[in-house]
Amino acid sequence: MLPEHHLNAESKDVIKLGMGLIATMSALVLALLTNSAKGSYDTQRNELTQAAANIILLDRVLAHYGPETIEARDLLKTSVAGMIDRLWPDDPVANAKLAPTIAGGELFFDKIQELKPQNDVQRSLQAEAIKMSIDIGQARLLLFEQSGRSIPMPFLVLLIFWVTVIFLSFGLFAPRNATVVATLFLCALSVSGAIFLIMELDRPFGGMIQISSAPLRNAMDNIDN
């Protein structure tokens, strides 16, 4: 559709140089966004795994304290079950609720503080249980504070714009045949897949690539065992 003098060798050279510059910038931004999304995903997954391990250890500490902690351990198990339901709701359309339930956590904390140690061992176990409860609460609040998207939307919009310009430049000189169309389609599909992967990693508790609930479910299964 363009006039012939727009498609001469000099014009092609300028377009190729410009597209090479945009392609380099796109590759850098794509790598940056992928690294940022993956780093955020791994951080929240590790925090959840650490919290699950602390829950199991806290239950063991309370079990060693004695039968006086049965009510506190029941509250702990109920809290873990509630956390699982909030983070991974049965309704696939519902969003994960990362906001912590303050009332349940305070009730569990009060139960531990109400314990009356009879010897040095129980006093040590109570102090350790209090410390671990605070650590678990901090991990829960940290997950909530990190629940926002780690990928700035202007970066993503700019990347999509650059990729669109690159594909438009491909179409300027490409012949119109099935092989070229199929190749451009597969290339576009690959780039779209990379952007989709970034957006999925930026939603660790939703979408197709979400953090597994296995650590917390294992922790709940180990309570009272």
Image (cartoon, rainbow, N blue to C red):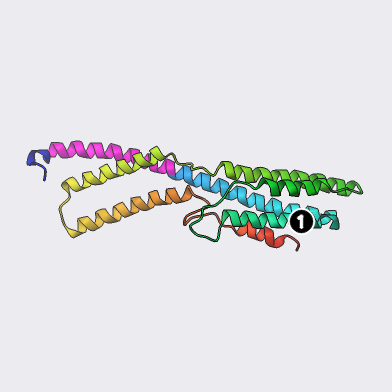
Residue at 72% x, 54% y: name it.
76
Q: Give x and y (percent) for residue 141.
A: 63, 43
Q: Give x and y (percent) for residue 217.
A: 64, 60
Q: Give x and y (percent) for residue 195.
A: 38, 48
Q: Quadrant of residue 168?
A: top left
Span highlighted in magenta in the image:
9-33
Question: In the rendered image, is residue 60 in sight?
Answer: no
Residue at 43% x, 40% y: name it.
32
Residue at 15% x, 37% y: name it.
11
**Nearer to me, 209 or 191:** 209
The crowd level at tag 1 (other Cα within 10 Å; few <14, some 14-19, many 20+) is many
**Nearer to me, 187 or 83:** 83
Residue at 51% x, 52% y: name it.
95
Query: From this viewpoint, which residue is outermost toward the left?
Result: 4
Query: From this viewpoint, which residue is outermost toward the front?
Result: 103
Secondary element type, mark 1: helix
Whether residue 196 is in magenta: the answer is no
Q: Main secondary structure of the magenta part?
A: helix
**Nearer to me, 174 or 129:** 129
Whether residue 29 is in magenta: the answer is yes
Position of 67 compared to 144: left or right? right
Q: Which residue is mark 1?
A: 73
The three-letter code of the residue at mark 1 reads Arg
Position of 78 compared to 207: left or right? right
Question: In the rendered image, is residue 59 in sight?
Answer: yes
Q: Quadrant of residue 60?
A: bottom right
Q: Is residue 84 above or below residue 106?
A: below
